Image (cartoon, rainbow, N blue to C red):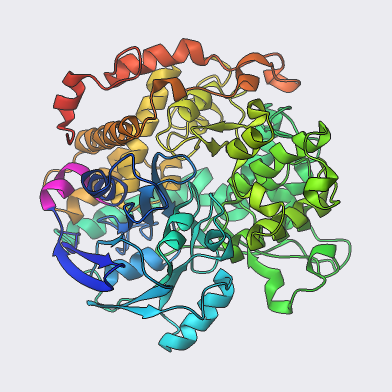
Amino acid sequence: MAWTKKLLRVDLSAGVCTEEALNMEWANDYLGQRGLATRYLVDEVDPKCDPLGPDNKLIMTTGPLTGTNASTAGRYSVVCKSPLTNAVACSNSGGFFGAELKMAGWDMIIFEGKAASPVYLHIVDGRAQLHPADDLWGKSVWEADKMLHAKVQDAQTRMALVGRSAEEGCLYAAVVNDLHRAAGRSGVGTVMASKNLKAVAVRGTQGIGNIHDPKRFMETVKAGKKVLAENPVTGQGLPTYGTQVLMNVINEVGALPTRNMSEVQFEGASKVSGEAMHEPRKTDGKPNLTTNGACYACTIACGRISTIDRTHFSVKDKPEYWINSGGLEYEAAWALGPDTGVDDIDALTYCNFLCNEDGMDPISFGSTVAAAMELYEKGVITDSHTGGMELRFGSAEALCWAAEKVAKGEGFGKDLGLGAERLCEKFGHPELSMTVKGQEFPAYDPRGIQGMGLAYATSNRGACHLRGYTVASEILGIPEKTDPLESEGKAGLVKAFQDATAAVDSAGLCVFTTFAWTLDDIAPQVDAACEGDWSPDRMLEVGERIWNMERDFNMKAGIDGSMDTLPKRLLSEGGNSGPAKDRVNELDKMLPEYYELRGWNSSGEITSETRQKFNLPA
């Protein structure tokens, strides 16, 4: 079977690393990665614990397909209780770190307690040891990665690290691996830093030799890759333009949140789009995009590598190597651009680099800056708070300044590091926080894409596009086209996407495959890799069980059905232009049906029948 059947437990307080057998009964119920790690979290962590206290645990976890040659099988997740939302956090990342961990012989690492001083974990196959990291503390991800590679003297070692923003307590800090891939959302990096854990360095040479039916697995993988290659999204659109292919599309349908979601279309969208990344600059004739890139085993290659104009104000003091790194993806480009009103693609790229270098979620960062800009323009935040910086919509200079301040935890950067909800509460205007359960919105306005409003409101980790991406259906027509402005039927659509996504996340695959694949394509690969009958129906059942388990953890943490809502702006202020003009999100029509389909009561509580159906932990 594709699991290694081993997990590594790291007691940071005692400085001890211990091997344990993986709970295979749980693996059969929850598959792996997101589902299995959350099952461990539920069993071992009090939902009411302080997310930044030693009783919270941090779990790095792979899926059964991670490290295989299935397309996109390089994923891993970081699971804990979130300091941003106080809800369950599961942040997914690509790159090569997850595959390296699996090839070192481990399905999962559970970090518990807190080290007395900064440490890093070094894994070489089955050997694991903690080492002092005092010299790495206070360094950016990029600096620490370079120093740590020099320590281990192995260029093939893969690193996952936190930057200065996490050390300074930014509540949306990320865990960054492979320099510019990240477990980015919900503050998992903040939890890692709170444990004085700076980095995890992994070298795996054991390969994946435990596939249940190797011949059939190779056949199913080959068939799956053919489907991806022949699909116009995964075979053409994403390789050419990355996720940035969506910028102009979403703007045209009137669902591009602009200036802290006060508008639904951005006049400068074309200047920061995927197409714009290909256009030669006037200064040097070179485009923003250098090349595309792929994570481990990925045949889609949606990643971006970009360069910044050397004459741009933001990089005047940066060394030459700094101006070429991981480029803009759609969510980051939106949060840093349209949401703040900035249409300077080099400024956006600079801020994205800073988010990579110092480990900040660009979605939460950009959305928080957007809230601060609205507060500034209303006269609530003043120059006395910002030290004279005019934090106005459209100011590229202010955006770059804000990124530098949050990265270092300096001055007003401390306030911005709180996230939009706490920032707006601090300045007396909670209504300007565009969040759900404390997490900032992604790049789809739910007035123009109705299903996404319900997906945001009910997401177990707060506002999130990757927990139920109904955009695929409502905008792209995958697997079938639904009207984005129509709320009827969206409850069932959202539930189906949420359950299927939970299963895909738990397998160790990238959710982008689902632009082309259904569970009919994925289940045969899991079934060939793992013992047991992994049919599409079983995969969907696993996904639904995971969703209910996450919901149950949140309810015990005090996050109830009253929080399944959207900001008042989206429920009462109609879109100002385009197809969504004068439209609000019709959450009140969708939510009751969603609860009923979930088997919850009218207050959003899991019924005893549903608990019994999925055998949820007590």
Measured from the top left, where is residue 70 in percent x and y?
A: 32, 58
Frontmost residue, 215 versus 114: 114
At x 73%, y 56%, the residue is 278
Is 466 rendered above or below residue 568? below
Q: Which residues are magenta?
A: 24-32
Frontmost residue, 308 versus 137: 137
Q: Quadrant of the N terminus?
A: bottom left
Q: Is residue 26 magenta?
A: yes
Is 123 rendered above or below residue 11? below
At x 72%, y 49%, the residue is 275
Q: In the picture, residue 569 is in which quadrant?
A: top right
| Dominant secondary-structure state across the stretch colored magenta | helix
- Asked if one can make out residue 494 in the rendered structure from this viewpoint, the answer is yes
Residue furthest to the right in view is 283
At x 32%, y 31%, the residue is 551
Is 251 rendered above or below residue 206? above
Measured from the top left, where is residue 164 in percent x and y?
A: 58, 65
Measured from the top left, where is residue 8 in percent x and y?
A: 23, 66
- Asked if one can make out residue 334 in the rendered structure from this viewpoint, the answer is no
- Badge count: 0
Q: Is residue 183 left or right of residue 499?
A: right
Measured from the top left, where is residue 523 in percent x and y?
A: 25, 44
